[in-house]
Amino acid sequence: MALEAVFERFTKKSPLTVMARLLMQQALSREWLDELFELHRDKQYTRELFFSTVVDLMALVALGLRPSLHAAAQASSELGVSLTALYDKVNHTEPEIVRALVRGGAEKLTPVVQFMKAQQTPWAAGYRMRVLDGNHLAASEKRLKPLRGFRGAALPGQSLVVYAPELDLVLDMVPAEDAHAQERALMGPVLEQVRKGELWLADRNFSTTGILFALHDKQAAFIIREHGVSPNPTVLGPPREVGRVETGFVFQQDVRIEEETGRQLALRRVELHLDEPTEDGETIIRLLTNVPVERMAAQDVARLYRRRWSIEGMFGRLESVFQSEVAGF
């Protein structure tokens, strides 16, 4: 694979790089990539250009070893098709194939990372952490020049990302070609993968009655920031001050949400009264959780939600490495 050049730079000076090389060769083998394409493709097909070749060339560009896909293709001795055919294959890559690539890669890498991080202290005892967030490119230089000044048009797509912070791995990604689709509207495929014993952290974009009930029905726990309008829980008692954390005083309150069918779900509302307002001028952050109080105190709920920003750190690292776009594409 042309991707060999990525590892050859470091092999002589870093033994760990040799291990990483073997790991990545196994995780991204040609056979697996092409099998994945055949399993998840819908309209696309393989004639002369294999999906593994496309991944190989795109990796060279994304990692900065070639300035553009055109340059990567010209340097390749294995392409065997025209540049037009290559660009057509890349431009029509189906979102489900991209998602399968992310999920499959995570499944291959998870056992290795778990072994490496076996001694790490868990974020919350008895739970597997999942951080959920949406990510898309805003009105910036990453958009077509004539459209950079328009906030509401022609964004380059978005994705819904499931991040395992304790493993520092993205486990799932639901890509959407429509950048204006609401993040919560992409939740269907994500909810199908929720498992018992997970603890989900998410911001208020995911604070809906349907999502909260779906997570609870899957026997998963959640700490989700409450939206100002949804799900508008019924208050069952006054808020009680229970102490403070590093950023403010913490209050706890019993609340209840209800489906249209009349089914009800008792929750805790944890309020963090901030010492200093947020950038948006907010002084109170309200969180909804189904984690029992005997398993996690309100202060720990507040502290854990603050760690949700770890996913922003992951996005930031990708931003710095890949510069948010394929240069010269």
Image: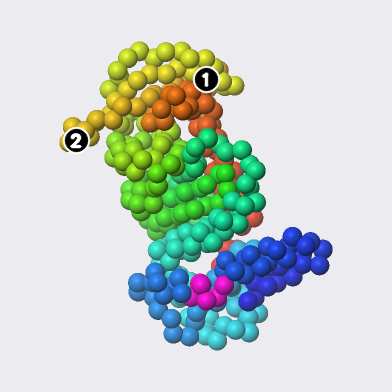
Which residue is under mark 1?
274
Residue that appears at 41% across and 75% down: 38
SS at mark 2?
loop
Q: Give the residue drawn at x 61%, y 38%.
A: 121
327 to the left or right of 139: right
Which of 236 and 135 lies nearest the eye of the viewer? 236
Vertical side of 103 occupied by 211: above or below: above
Query: Residue 131: image x %, image y %?
Result: 48, 42
Image quadrant occupied by the C terminus: bottom right
Q: Nearer the viewer, residue 302 or 85?
A: 302
**Residue 160 seen:** yes
- The percent position of residue 296, horizontal first and vertical second, equals 48, 27
Relative to 313, does residue 227 appear above or below in the rendering? above
Q: Is residue 292 left or right of residue 231?
A: right
Give percent across and percent down for residue 123.
56, 36
Q: Amino acid at mark 2?
A: Glu
Position of the N terminus, as image quadrant, is: bottom right
Q: Is residue 266 magenta?
A: no
Q: Is residue 58 visible?
A: no
- Of badges 2 and 1, nearer the viewer stands 2
- Give how far apart the Cα atoms at labels 2 and 1 are: 34 Å
Q: Which residues are magenta?
A: 29-34
- What residue is shown with label 2? 260
Mark 1 crowdedness (10 Å alpha carbons): few <14, some 14-19, many ≥20: some
Is residue 189 or residue 120 the one in the foreground? 120
Give the label on residue 165, or none: none
Q: Main secondary structure of the magenta part?
A: helix
